[in-house]
Amino acid sequence: MMRSVLAIAGRELRSYFASPIFYVVTAAFLVVTGYLFTLILFYSREASLRGVFANMSILLIILGPALTMRLLAEEHRTGTIELLLTSPVRDFEVVLGKFLAGVGLLLAMLAITLYYPLLLFLYGSPEKGSIIGGYVGVILLGAVFIAIGLFASSLTANQIVAAVLTFMMLLLLWLIGAAGDFASPPLADIFRYMAVDTYYSDFTRGVVDTKAVVYYLSVVAVFLFATVRSLETRRWR
């Protein structure tokens, strides 16, 4: 099973690295985070990445759809999805392979930002816990965004439509917590629990809460399952 998953992930990563999309998104990500890192460091005079991590989450809402829009939509458009679905590979292996490829792209982008904490350690004494927690939080949040984007990409053959659907779902999950301010219990508590940003700030403070990890992994599992079911319905059309 893992051989098939890794083969699909490797194939997807090679196609992304041969495409300008990854480099454009990565360049935009690095330009904005680099600017924020310099600006926040200049004004706060603190050896901390909390402000950068806080803005990374917003940036991923904007750039994430561009990374995930072609994961399955491109397969639908070119017709290669039919080859995948009729090959001796199960649907969940296809979905898991695509998801791992998306996570691999995210890790590649974040790896380049490691020079931020390196600079802080060279010229200051930053808190290790908040940096490690921040990266853990970004990876978990990014995994949620990738799972959602993969699901949206399974619904259409149009990459632009997939990107718009992904952005709308991410924005909804991000803002749903604010709806809790206008609702009464227990609905308010449910809205706040569903919001993906509810737990994120804890990671930037160096607090890796098991409850938050379980929540993010649960959301990933839900959307991966939904993507598998989406492919299954296509198989029987």
Image: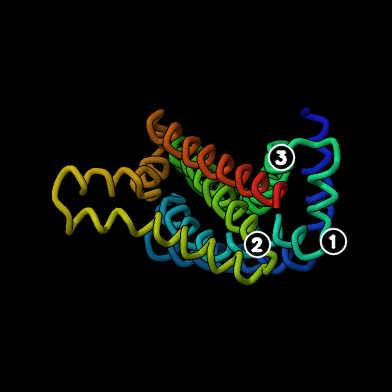
Which of pointers 2 and 3 lies earlier in the amino acid sequence? Answer: 2
- Name the side, left or right, on which 41 lies relative to 101: left
For disc 2, the neighbor class at 10 Å (few under 14, some 14 to 19, many from 20) is many
In the rendered image, the residue lying farthest to the left is 184
Residue 75 appears in which quarter of the rendering? Answer: bottom right
Q: Is residue 26 visible?
A: no
| Residue that label 2 marks | 69
| Residue 108 pos. (x, y %) | 70, 50
Residue at point 53%, 41% (across, down): 220
The residue at which mark 3 appears reads as 91
- The structure residue drawn at horizontal position 21% and vertical position 48%, both measured from the top left corner, is 188
Q: Which residue occupies the foreground of this view, 174 or 75? A: 75
Q: Is residue 105 left or right of residue 149?
A: right
Residue at 47% x, 56% y: name it.
57
- Element type at mark 2: loop
Q: Which residue is mark 1?
A: 18
Circle 1: residue type: Ala
Residue 152, quarter of picture? bottom right
The answer for how far apart the CA atoms under marks 2 and 1 are is 16 Å
